[in-house]
Amino acid sequence: MAAPSGVKILSPAGAIKPTGTWSLGARAGDFVFVAGIRGIDPASNALVAGPEHRIRQAFQNMQAIAGSEGARLADCVRLTVFVTDMNRLRPLLNQIQEELWAGGPYPPRTIVEVAKLNQDDIFEVEGTFYAPKTA
C-alpha cells in the first residue's frame, strides 16, 4: 500500500502481526524503516523463550521486513536497541550482532536501557536500511 507521496507501508507475508495502530515498516525512496521489533514467533505471534533466542528472533523479524524490499543486514545504516538490563543484555546483543554481521562492518547503533517494554519484554530493535529501488 503506497501513500500519494510514494511512501509504501510494509506488511510482508510471514511477518509478525502488529498489535496496535502501527506498521511493521515503510519504504520512503531508497530507505526502508523498520519499526521497533521484538522476539516474536511469526507463526504464533507469541514471544519466544530465552534471552538469546528472543534477541535472535527480533533480528530475524527485522531482517524479514527489510528483506521484503531487497535489503540485507549489511544494508542497515542505523540501529536503535532498547534493553531492560544493560549489564546483562548488552554482551549478548554484541555477540549476536557479531555473528549476524559476520564480524562487521557494523551499522551505527544506539542502545538505551528502559524500565519496561511491551509484554514485559527484554529487547526491542528498530532499523533503517538503504535499499535503492530497482527499475
Image (tube, grey):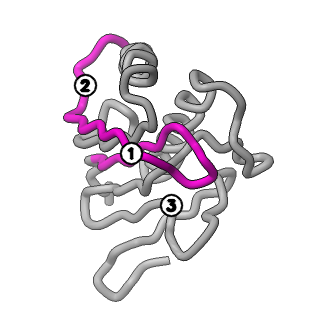
Q: Residue furthest front?
A: 115
- Marks 2/3: CA distance? 23 Å
* Residue 50 x/y as whole percent: 66, 25
Residue shown at the point (53%, 30%) measured from the top left: 55
Query: Percent x, y for residue 79?
Result: 30, 41
Residue identified by numbered label 3: 24
Instruction: Count the marks.
Output: 3
| 7 up-or-down from 55: above or below | below
Given the image, on which type of amino acid does mark 1 rest? Val
Query: What is the three-letter code of the residue carrying label 3?
Result: Leu
Mark 3, mark 1: which one is toward the viewer? 1
Number of the label disc, if any, that sits on residue 106: 2
Badge 3 marks a residue whose secondary structure is: loop
Find disc 1 in the rendering and name its residue. Answer: 114
Specify few, some or many for label 1: CA neighbours under 10 Å numbering under 14, 14-19, or 20 or more.
few
Q: Which residues are magenta?
A: 102-129
